[in-house]
Image (cartoon, grey):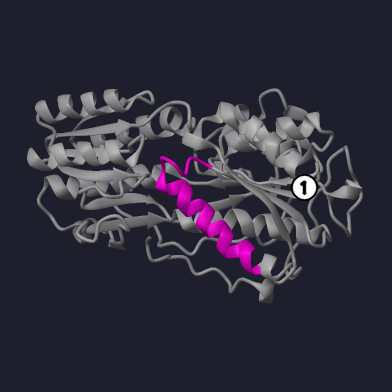
Amino acid sequence: MSTPLHRLAPLGVALALSTAGLAACGSNSDNSSSNSSSSSSGGVSAACSLDNPPTSGASAPPSGSPGKASGKVGAILPDTTSSTRYTLYDAPLLTKGLKAAGITPDVQNAGGSTSKFASIAQSMIGEGVKVLIIDSIDAPSGAGVEKQADQAGVKVIDYDRVNLGGTAPYYVSFDNEDVGKLQAQTMVDCLNAQGVTKPKIIMMDGGKDVDNNAVLFAKGAHEVLDPLQSAGKLDIVSESVVKGWTISNAAPTFTQALTAAGGQVDGVVAANDDIANAVIGVLKGSGLNGHVVVTGQDSGVEGLQNIITGQQSMTIFKDVSLEADAATKLAVALISGKDPSSAGLTLTKFDDPQSASHNLQALLLPAQVITQANIQDVIDAGALTKAEICKGIESDCAKIGLS
């Protein structure tokens, strides 16, 4: 497991449900009163605005131009279903960045098939790519591609997801353990601002069976929640895994968890916005929609709309432009035979728990908490437009002053 780069305020009992610096979470039309007990009285509001949301302690992103180089770089993305980001953001950003650096890009998506992922990699290696940027479907198949690339003298960058047990020397991603901390801490802060005591929490983890990022998200969340549970400040009533990040499994998985919790829940740590949306659907059917603090991740249109309409409390904005830019700069440095530090890249050792001989250097980027109060930041970063976010919910956007 990696050495955390975050430096959040000390956690545990010292911050257990502290109200310092927080504004009251907003309420939606279904509920305008706050609550001093748990969800059994139905007073918790999903909408949440914080004056001082938790902030990431990860390293600052690299600045400056990636420079120029020649040659071909291949990038393989995993699927179009676990997240909308790969089509909306990663593919066009990587293509644009590599072209601007003078490199010929070949950016493809494996469509969730490990065999197609391997086939694309073989084709790219055969066509003479000098660097492979891979966001694998799972670690074993990713490690297999890395071995083939290594044998062909092709340098590999693990992109967004690390391949434990692999051979890639470089890893570019966000500080995923920090992401889990931000999700859990924001949920605690929102519940705290509403005056909820000893809230009941359900954790809906992502595909921990295939993705080490999901493991890190959950680990970070537990670092916030476990000390509070030990102090009697909250109760994690259930934790489930949406295996393989298969979103169609999220609703039935949450339904089982909610039933096991006696139909009572105050907060749900949902690993991403797609899982959060499935949770919201179940909450609607249970008459709890708008009364439960729900986290998310990815800052896609659906997740942001759920926040604007008061059904989801927060999401994590991972500015993919920073990740694509960092991967591009690293690829340019590798093709040029330069040390990554020459491109302004500060890499740190990343431990692979499955292989002591895997000498992996990582660049981990900061993420940002988004609530109703700062959705404008996503627009200002150029990730989405107001028109895209507010389509069909224009009156709701006007209510929160989105410009």
Residue 220 is left or right of residue 142, and the answer is right
**Residue at position x 20%, y 43% in the image:** 156
Task: Determine which quarter of the picture holds residue 113.
Answer: top left
* 135 and 245: which is toward the camera: 245
Residue 401 visible, this orientation: no
Q: Which residue matches tag 1?
A: 265
State yes or no: residue 217 in magenta. Answer: yes
Residue 106 is left or right of residue 216, and the answer is left
State yes or no: residue 97 in magenta. Answer: no
The vertical placement of 5 against 26, above or below, is: below
The quarter of the rendered structure image containing the C terminus is top right
Q: Which residues are magenta?
A: 206-227
Residue 355 visible, this orientation: yes
Looking at this view, name the residue that lies furthest to the front: 260
Q: Position of residue 312 (x, y in %)?
A: 70, 41
Badge 1 crowding class, 10 Å Cα cut-off, few under 14, some 14 to 19, many 20 or more, is many
* 320 and 39: which is toward the camera: 39
**Residue at position x 72%, y 59% in the image:** 235
Amino acid beneath label 1: Val
Residue 342 is left or right of residue 24, and the answer is left
Q: How many marks do you count on the picture?
A: 1
Q: Position of residue 81 (x, y in %)?
A: 47, 27
Task: Determine which quarter of the picture holds residue 340.
Answer: bottom left
Instruction: Provide the secondary structure element on which disc 1 rests.
Output: loop
The vertical placement of 3 against 168, above or below, is: below
Q: Position of residue 202 (x, y in %)?
A: 68, 48
Q: Position of residue 129 (x, y in %)?
A: 13, 33
The quarter of the rendered structure image containing the N terminus is bottom left
**Residue at position x 23%, y 28% in the image:** 118
Q: Main secondary structure of the magenta part?
A: helix
